[in-house]
Image (cartoon, rainbow, N blue to C red):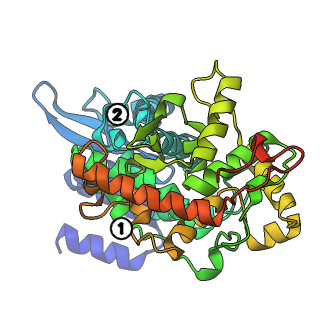
Amino acid sequence: MSKLALAINQIKTDLNDTYSIKNYFISNFPKTSKALQIIDDEYMKPKRRKGFNLVPRDSKKNGIIYYARYSYNGKNLPTKFCTHTGDIKEAEQYAIKNKDKLISQYLTKKEGKIYKILSEFYKKESSIPEVKTLTERGRRDYESIINKYFIPYLKAEKIVSFDQIKKITLIKYQEYVLSGKIKNLEGNDNDVYIPIKPQSVNNYMKPVRKIFAYLTRKGEIADNITEMVKKLPVNTKDINPRGCYELDKLKGIFNKRWENDLSCLLCAIIYTTGMRNSEIKKIRVEDIIKIDNCRFIIIKESKTINGMRQVPLHDYVYRKINIWAKKNKDKIYIFNECKDETFSKANCYLAKILKVSNEQLKKDNITFYSGRHFYKTLLSAEGLGENIEEIFMGHKVTGNVKQSYNHLDKQGKERLVKKARQALSIIDRCIFTTARKKPRGRRGCGGAALA
């Protein structure tokens, strides 16, 4: 009977005596036992290690050398660390001893790179084309979203490189914002967290999408993962439509007594020009020009590129702006110091003149910005034309509208002045009244409207 047959019989007779079986194989099959031990050391032990595995690589100097690949937070790091030895036991000892140090060095290096790119992307001095197309306000808003919300979220998720950001990572970011754990950009400076609506969550994703599109274009990352993330659906109940006053509500309002000249002036500006709050803050004396005896405010700084435009200015409002500018002659921007509270105060003063309660303002969602909606509704209702949004309000321009009303071009200037006079005629008829008799006492903003 062969030695192998004897070994099999020995196994059958005593299956529980593993110690005897091992000794029998070592004694009778020393070479086979040694080979099995080598295989066991080579393949079985690394699998039992926690937090890393050893990968052999060919080396001209040593024949073979081991590299340690660590895992962090359940994921393998996308790099390997040389153990400087071809001995598996020494490599294992090196990997265990230097694990924390090597992982820490890697994370510091990688984390610094990703967060440096994110935090500096929307800097004012950035030369990135995607940033250059933004307005100053848009750039600041995008920079704020990335630094205050997206970066802290990634750090909380222990993200250290762009390749760790997956589709689920960005979906969780959407849910994180939606949950209200992130303070609203337009909220107070305290720690009160305001729930975010789906439409706003989609806005929080815009600066993230722009960054990933740029990195993909430059080859810094392989795929634009944001293209796989859909916008959150916006339901009608999530939209609180902004209200505005009825079109005949404001007729003669600026002939009445106001308690605050600045509030009166600010309301006169927005209800007769449709300018954005941020645009009003940037009005300068030199931005008011005259074209064929028709005054305009040239808006050079706006929310969007399309916001750069010329807005017709009523003579009454021009005079009051001029008076206010002389009182504040040291200021570059006439209304730069106006804060959100200043606009809210002006809105409340207007409501008081109109005998509208604060409860009604809140119910109808009428804010200072509602003056812009009133302006659009009024001019459209009076037949000025559908392209009023493109010409005077700074909305997205389609076709050749912008070029057609370019005041630097002769034909465009004629069209612009004609349209402006139509707009001013509507404003004069529907907001200002003819002062046939000089009323007694103080008038709104310091005087009566023009006849």
From the top left corner, tell me how far across and down residue 282 is, in percent: 55, 36
Q: Quadrant of residue 332?
A: top right
| Sequence-first disc among 1 and 2 | 2
Image mark count: 2
Left or right: residue 273 versus residue 77 is right
Name the residue: 64% across, 20% down.
329
User: Mark 2: few, some, or many residues within 10 Å (few <14, many ≥20)?
Assistant: many
**Which residue appears at 39% of the width and 61% of the height?**
390
Q: In which quarter of the image is the C terminus?
A: bottom right
Q: Mark 1 points at which residue?
A: 228
Relative depth, front residue between 329 and 99: 329
Which kind of residue does numbered mark 1 sit on?
Met
Q: Which amino acid does label 2 sit on?
A: Ala
CA gap between label 1 and label 2 equals 42 Å
- For the point 53% across and 44% down, which residue is it? 141
Residue 445 horizontal side relative to residue 16, left or right: right
Q: Which mark is residue 348?
A: none
| Quarter holding residue 339 | top right
Residue on which the image places disc 2: 91
**Circle 1 sits in a helix, a strand or a loop, which is it?**
helix
Give the left or right position of residue 405, taking residue 302 as reference. Answer: left
Residue 156 appears at what percent x and percent y?
59, 47
